[in-house]
Structures are given as structure tokens and as C-alpha cells.
Image (cartoon, rainbow, N blue to C red):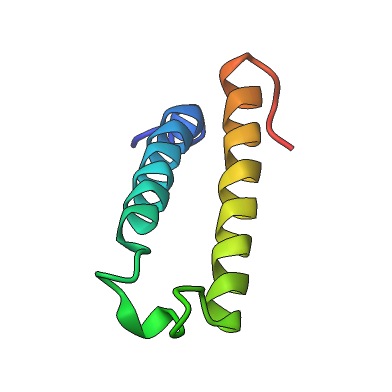
Amino acid sequence: LVDIVSLKHESGVVGFFFVLTHAFMGALVAMPAYKSKWFDDKGRFYGNNEVSMAFGVTAATLITAVTIRSLFGKTSW
């Protein structure tokens, strides 16, 4: 059988790169020309989309901090 516990570090780093790619692509498409229903007439996000984007940035920041801590040999939180 595969020892899943020993693969935890590698799968976490691969998962981080998936999350990072998702966040980067999400930021690329968040523009009025592509997602017009997310923006009002002034070109600003609607409230629910702005909150969603803020939580996404916070989550990406936290997962980056945990991954950097894990890569330097410390245990995850």
C-alpha cells in the first residue's frame, strides 16, 4: 500500500500550486471587459463580488504563508 502520510508534504505543495494558479487566473478574468455582470456602471465591483475577492486574497495570502513555513522544514499550523 502507498504510505499516504509520507506523501503529505509533496501533495500539499502540488495543491498550493493549483491554488496559486486558480487565484492568478481568477485575477486575470476579473475585468469589466470579460465579466461585465460583476461591475457597476462606474467600473467598480458590486459589493458581493468585492467581498468575495477580498476573502480570496486573504485565503491566498494565508495558504502562501503556510506553504512557505512548510517548505522551510517547520510543521504546518
Relative to 8, residue 61 above or below: below
The residue located at (60%, 25%) in the rendering is 68
Q: Find residue 77 and report its horizontal and vertical position in percent.
A: 74, 38
Q: Find residue 67 and report its horizontal and vertical position in percent.
A: 57, 31
**28 or 67, which is in the foreground?**
28
Relative to 57, residue 38 above or below: below
Q: Find residue 7 and report its horizontal and vertical position in percent.
A: 43, 30
| Relative to 35, 49 lies left or right | right
| Relative to 49, 62 lies left or right | right
The residue located at (44%, 74%) in the rendering is 43
Q: Find residue 63 and report its horizontal and vertical position in percent.
A: 59, 42
| Relative to 21, 49 lies left or right | right
Instruction: Give the residue furthest to the right.
Output: 77
Residue 62 location, quadrant = top right
The residue located at (45%, 39%) in the rendering is 16
**55 or 37, which is in the foreground?**
37
Instruction: Give the residue furthest to the top.
Output: 72
